[in-house]
């Protein structure tokens, strides 16, 4: 995009795991600034009919409702100036929808809302999220080996399709299109004849070769996989199409970018130097570095590797230690303490417990207690559980345990992507972000104790802003 302070603006959208966020980003003389933003909790989790307790699904209608609520809250005058829309969302997951017989994607109904035309899902399945657990290690081992650098895991789109194919084939007969939830939104906005997916999202589904940017169709066909459900694939940062209708006041014909991974957009929102590493601790935790230009990942997956190479932009890759154990570990610990106090006949709010255990840990500068906090397992070791060792009678206070737990979260990340590897890659600085890191001084202290680099906080990652920035920097 070109122009000064009066130029058009870009709308960034992120369809996250628990909430939807939208951001209007403008170019000013000071650079890119967020003019308006809004977020809404989706409250979309719902039960899974087919997978039972192992399933983790969300109601697609509630996600789109939250998106509509966010856009309706933004100033109409600003929305009318939107020239590009960038969309990101939770990766790996899959949603199915039904197309019209003329091969034009339907999947929704356009209606007139208070702020102009809006669309609502129609003939659309639940979103099976990245957290879904229906594909057991035994089930995954029964599937063909992918020709991909990324190991297949439960919650990946192709793994979920295989599960339906083998466990509930009638389900698949109801649909003829599939994508991530953000691919779905792009398809609806642009009325795409066939879903279009970025390399970033395709790699997160499994059975995708990032080197030649193609699905493993030969491998999939041999096992009876319904390859007609696989979207077409395009480069991240490219334009998927134009809006077929005005949308909450956004003009008809507005350019829409191909849907992007929320992780890549989050990194894009703050990473400016290749010598920076991004440490993000929210519900989960990630430690990320940029790989040198020209790097290519291995041709075959290494299931035991704790580092995953995520396609980024312009053919580059990010090396990511993506831990399933972050702020959720501390939240589980707080919940445990709350249950114990309730069983003892006392009622204390969890927010009060959190504040007290952090205060107690600040009073304990060290603890020899060792907590391996992988209570949720890890993708490269799904059956690994948490453990506590070096237990001494003198270090059983809440302060000692909380300090050790916080240290364990950081040490676990560093066991996945060691400090030596960071040094060899040329890392000079850590950009710290994420809600858990922001609210927990003990976590920050342990970061600075374990990582021998300057740490800069306040570089909060924001996928909605990152998605908008991508559109500013490309056409």
Image (spheres, rainbow, N blue to C red):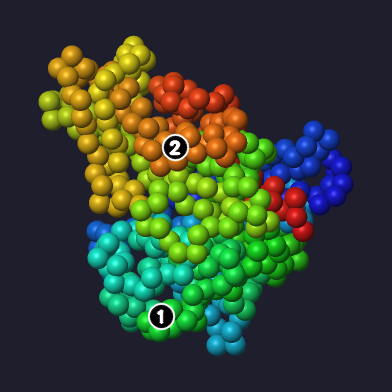
Residue drawn at the location 45% of the way across and 64% of the way down:
300
Judge by depth and name the residue closer to the eye, 58 or 370: 370
**Mark positioned earlier in the residue sequence (2 or 1):** 1
Outermost bottom residue: 101
The answer to whether mark 2 and mark 1 are in CB contact below 8 A is no
Residue drawn at the location 32% of the way across and 16% of the way down:
366
Residue 266, visible in the rendered structure: yes
Q: Position of residue 38 (x, y in %)?
A: 59, 43
Q: Position of residue 303 (x, y in %)?
A: 37, 57
Judge by depth and name the residue closer to the eye, 428 or 338: 428
Q: Which mark is residue 225?
A: 1
Residue drawn at the location 35% of the way across and 20% of the way down:
358
Q: Quadrant of the C terminus?
A: bottom right
Q: Which residue is mark 2?
A: 418
Which picture quadrant has residue 247? bottom right
Residue 12, visible in the rendered structure: no
Q: Does 381 appear above or below 98?
A: above
Tell whether 174 sits left or right of 391.
right
The Cα–Cα distance between marks 2 and 1, rounded to whole angstroms, is 38 Å
Which picture quadrant has residue 344? top left
Which picture quadrant has residue 395? top left
Q: Position of residue 305 (x, y in %)?
A: 40, 51
């Amino acid at each position: 995009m070109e122009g000064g302070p009066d130029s058009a603006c870009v709308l960034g959208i992120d369809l996250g795991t628990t909430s939807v966020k939208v951001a209007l980003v403008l170019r000013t003389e000071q650079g890119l600034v967020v003019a308006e933003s809004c977020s809404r909790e989706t409250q979309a989790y719902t039960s899974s009919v087919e997978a039972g307790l192992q399933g983790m699904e969300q109601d697609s209608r509630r996600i789109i409702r939250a998106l509509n609520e966010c856009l309706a809250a933004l100033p109409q005058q600003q929305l009318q100036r939107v020239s590009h829309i960038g969309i990101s969302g939770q990766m790996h997951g899959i949603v199915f929808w039904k197309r019209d017989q003329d091969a034009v994607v339907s999947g929704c109904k356009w209606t007139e809302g208070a702020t102009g035309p809006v669309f609502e899902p129609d003939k659309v399945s639940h979103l099976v999220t990245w957290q879904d657990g229906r594909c057991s290690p035994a089930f995954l081992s029964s599937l063909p080996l992918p020709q991909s650098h990324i190991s297949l895991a439960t919650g990946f789109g192709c793994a979920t399709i295989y599960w339906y194919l083998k466990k509930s084939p009638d389900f698949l007969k109801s649909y003829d299109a599939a994508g991530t939830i953000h691919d779905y939104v792009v398809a609806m906005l642009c009325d795409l004849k066939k879903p279009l997916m970025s390399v970033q999202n395709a790699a997160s589904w499994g059975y995708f070769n990032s080197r030649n940017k193609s699905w493993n169709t030969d491998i999939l066909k041999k096992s009876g996989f319904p390859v007609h459900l696989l979207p077409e694939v395009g480069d991240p940062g490219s334009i998927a199409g134009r809006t077929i209708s005005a949308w909450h006041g956004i003009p008809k014909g507005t350019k829409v970018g191909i849907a992007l991974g929320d992780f890549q957009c989050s990194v894009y929102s703050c990473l400016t130097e290749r010598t920076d590493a991004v440490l993000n601790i929210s519900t989960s935790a990630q430690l990320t570095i940029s790989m040198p230009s020209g790097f290519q990942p291995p041709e075959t997956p290494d299931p035991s590797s704790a580092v995953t190479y995520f396609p980024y932009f312009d053919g580059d890759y990010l090396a990511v230690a993506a831990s399933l154990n972050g702020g959720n570990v501390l939240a589980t610990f707080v919940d445990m303490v709350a249950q114990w106090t309730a069983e003892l006949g006392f009622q204390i709010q969890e927010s009060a417990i959190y504040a007290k255990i952090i205060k107690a840990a600040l009073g304990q500068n060290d603890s020899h207690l060792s907590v391996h906090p992988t209570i949720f397992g890890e993708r490269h070791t799904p059956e690994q559980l948490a453990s506590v060792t070096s237990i001494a009678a003198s270090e059983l206070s809440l302060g000692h345990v909380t300090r050790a737990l916080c240290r364990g979260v950081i040490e676990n990340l560093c066991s996945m992507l060691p400090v030596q590897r960071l040094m060899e890659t040329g890392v000079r600085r850590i950009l710290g972000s994420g809600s858990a890191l922001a609210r927990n001084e003990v976590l920050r202290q342990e970061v600075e104790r374990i990582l021998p680099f300057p740490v800069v906080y306040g570089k909060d990652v924001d996928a909605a802003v990152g998605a908008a920035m991508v559109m500013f920097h490309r056409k």
